Image (cartoon, grey):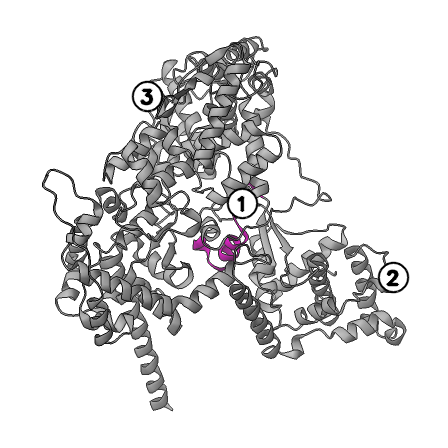
Amino acid sequence: MNMMGTIVAETAERGCIEVERRMGEMLWSAVRHGGLLDPTWWHAWSMGVQSSISIEGQILAVDMQPPRTEEKSSTLGRRWFADPLTKILIARWHRDGLIYDGRTPAAECMLLSVGGDEAHDILSGKFLRSARNAWAFRLPGLMLAFAKGEIPSESVPRPTWERALYGCHRPVVDMPSPTVAETKYPKPPLRRSLDGELAALTVRERDYQAGREAKVVRKAAAVLAIKRLPPQHRPLEQCLREWCVYVLEREKRGRHSIGYSPDTVARYLNALILLFAEWTSVAPIEAPVAELETAIIRYLDQTEGRRRVDGVKAVISFLRFRRAVGSAEALDIDLDEYAGEDQTAPDLLLPEDYTRASRALRQQGKADLALMLTLMYRAGLRVAEAAALRVGDVNVSDHHIELVVETNPARSLKTKTSRRILPLDVLLEHDERQLLLDRVRERKAASRFGVEAWLFGRATALSPPAEKNVTKGIGQCLIEIIGSSNIKPGHLRHSFASYLLATLLLPAEVEGAVVPRALRAVISPLRFERVADRLLGHGRLGAGALHAVSQLMGHTGPRTTLRSYCHLLDMSLGILCNRHVSLVPIEEARLLAATGVSAEARRKALSRVRPPFPVIAGDTHVRPTGADVTLWSPHAARKIADARLYASAFSRLSRQLARDLAADVTKAEPRGFQASAQKAVEEKQRKERKRQVVHCDRSYGVPWRAIEAAVMTPALVSTDESSTRMVERWRTSAGRLLPTTIGIVTVLPTSNELRQMIDRRLHLSRNLHRAERVALNQVITRWQRGYADIRLPRLQDAQAFVSLLVGVMGFAMQEVELSLTSVHGHGMTSEDIHRFMIDRTVRPRLAGRSGWRGSLVVRFRPVGVERPILAAQACRMALLILAIDLDARRPLTSTL
């Protein structure tokens, strides 16, 4: 027995070493061939290769979760696009079904895959330095800095990338149940004491008041209203009132005039109210520095997201006021550390969604909103800039159409550098340019103001459309088109910057670049030819492209553009790593082993490549194009032949894996998919249901026929007290669950399809844990109290209930839709929450220190049935029957 155990242990150890060696081989290839030059992402890459990959055609992307420091994550996630060799190794990894536990560091895994001098180079760091030096000759400086982790750019979130690859649109999140009353918490005492100041700051403007002058008048009216309020008796309230007057009158960072706007002051005042909610000392301007530092740090640690950003700005303004009134002692707090953590969720509007939204607005008779949507999406205008355009801002000449974005009586720009001139003749499509020119000619003919007339709104209006109406109209249209509230009008500007920079970084020699089909309308060589010469000149890449995009956005510098708006740098890096000129020749044995072809097949592939070498022009001062560099690069024919072998091998290896990945993200009504993909989805679901039925233990299941007989013929079991109690509770609960009268026996489903679904859910894979029983008890108790939804406020109960549905009853993740009621959970998809239940590191900054806030809402979305509403009710009845059976056999302390 000991000898057998030793043999088994040695075999397992050899298998573990082989898995780590294969992982090290993939990582080594990703660094050398794929530009994965930042070692802080190596562990996240090794875990993402196994669980978070996407495939479409020749594109393989790996989603990497952010590396975590001792306390918190330093950035958002990132996406990595595989080079030709590494994606073959990844496809082989998944084909062989290998699993890497992640306990061995990534660098040690690389040591197992190499030997000799290469192992010494990895230990000494020479391997990484040589890889960076080698990539410096093949990548523009911008892409090299991004690969090394020196640029703070964020990737597009995974749901948007799935929409770009698979075309699946998620349904609109259901509204909260109308039967659940919202809890109203009392206002804190400090908030009640400052109601007068907040009312003066938040007074609504009249509909006819607009423009800069009206905002200046409103600011003066707010100051006068605050000064007329009765005096405050407490030093804290009086100090905050004086701060309000100070920032309204003297703050020199206002956009329209000296002083912040009343809306901004109201937001900052609410932040200061939370900051000083428990303040019991003297006025903050007279308090000791240590006490004030403690209060500020405690408040900032307890907030996050947009509230934290407002809090940081409010604290900075209050400290400036504190120095102005006489207290010059500075605080030792690094506020930039807190302010830098809030980053706008990087998201993009796909070209097809933009087309559908524009068409929908025109069909609804909202031509103004449709044209503003075009200018925001195609030219990167802000909402305020698009709404307050004048006819004279559009300058038309024989060959160019330029839009001047500048300050006017109704609008102030965000910064001085926001003034810019946009070349609409290359940014807009032909039909979009024609619509704009028609609007300009129409307004010039209909308005008596000429070039001073507003481009949008009524022709004779004295003021442009209100910003809030534009934001609301475009936002509602995007929600209806996309089916989600994640993308807002502000993301149109994000899309413009990301698409334009990716286009300008597109290599000229790559005709069929690895760009998803859904993005080729905005990222293509054709668009590059139209835009590049006007913005950059011939053949310009790297820093020149970034500077051009920054100028069109009206930013103070390129770093602002990189930090907040360029979300496709990872895809641009992947495209550049897939170029023929960037391929690194490898040993023939390694190439043949990776591609699975013979030496004779490689020789034939090399013989078929005949690159047409160009004739050198007489003028040697002309800068060569990317195609010239590729064709004259060393071993050009060999690289092109190897690239073709890579593509053929990857297509052969990834065919089944791509179908499985597409099936995982496809909903009940997939859009733009072939019949074969739909059949693959149905076949996978059928096999999963069969496996659940075959491998389950029937002793754990609830007999459907016994439940049906007990309800239909209660007299047969009237002597059994527990059965009688079970029947009565079944009748009562079923009556509340279904739209029928309580106690009537006809509430049982009559459809064979629904009864089969209930029967399948009642065959459990194991006995329930106590936590799962408690969570189920809470759900049923909530139903019996008259609530129609499933809400679980505690994280432990939510995780136990999801484990019951998915791990015990056999629900698929696509059938259980999860959402959060908190504000911080509105941007999370059901898949994100499912992954958060499994692994806490998936969404480390959801909310609060525990990573949880609000209640979990569970909704059933059964797939593959003709009547999804009744099928969802059948899922609820299965839960009800399970709870009744558990209560009858082993009751909990709190009865149903």
Which numbered tag is attached to residue 825?
1
Residue type highlighted by circle 2: Ile
SS state under label 3:
loop
Q: In terms of sequence position, does the residue under pointer 3 or pointer 1 come before the other? A: 3
Task: Examine the rendered structure and indicate whether residue 204 appears above or below residue 221.
Answer: below
Q: Dot 1, how many residues are within 10 Å of its Cα: few (below 14), some (14-19), or many (20+)? A: some
Location of residue 419 in the rendering, given as x and y in whole percent from the top left corner: 36, 21
Task: Determine whether, in the image, residue 862 is placed left or right of residue 503.
Answer: right
Location of residue 453 in the rendering, given as x and y in whole percent from the top left corner: 50, 14
Determine if the magenta segment contains residue 827.
yes
The answer, for residue 299, to whether it is visible in the render is: no
Q: Which residue is mark 3?
A: 329
Foreground residue, 760 or 651?
651
SS state under label 1:
helix
Foreground residue, 859 or 228?
859
Task: Determine whether, in the image, residue 741 is placed left or right of residue 3.
Answer: right
Residue type highlighted by circle 3: Glu
Q: Residue at x 47, y 27 (%)?
A: 436
Q: Which residues are magenta?
A: 822-842
Location of residue 534 in the rendering, given as x and y in whole percent from the top left corner: 29, 32
Q: Quadrant of the C terminus?
A: bottom right
Tell me whether the residue at label 3 lies in contact with that at label 1, contact meaning CB atoms closer than 8 angstroms.
no
Foreground residue, 827 or 631?
631
Task: Determine whether, in the image, residue 858 is placed left or right of residue 180.
Answer: left
Q: Which residue is mark 2?
A: 744
Task: Determine whether, in the image, residue 529 is placed left or right of residue 342.
Answer: left
Which numbered tag is attached to residue 455?
none
Q: Name the mark nearer the viewer: 3 or 1.
A: 1
Task: Examine the rendered structure and indicate whether residue 818 appears above or below residue 96.
Answer: above
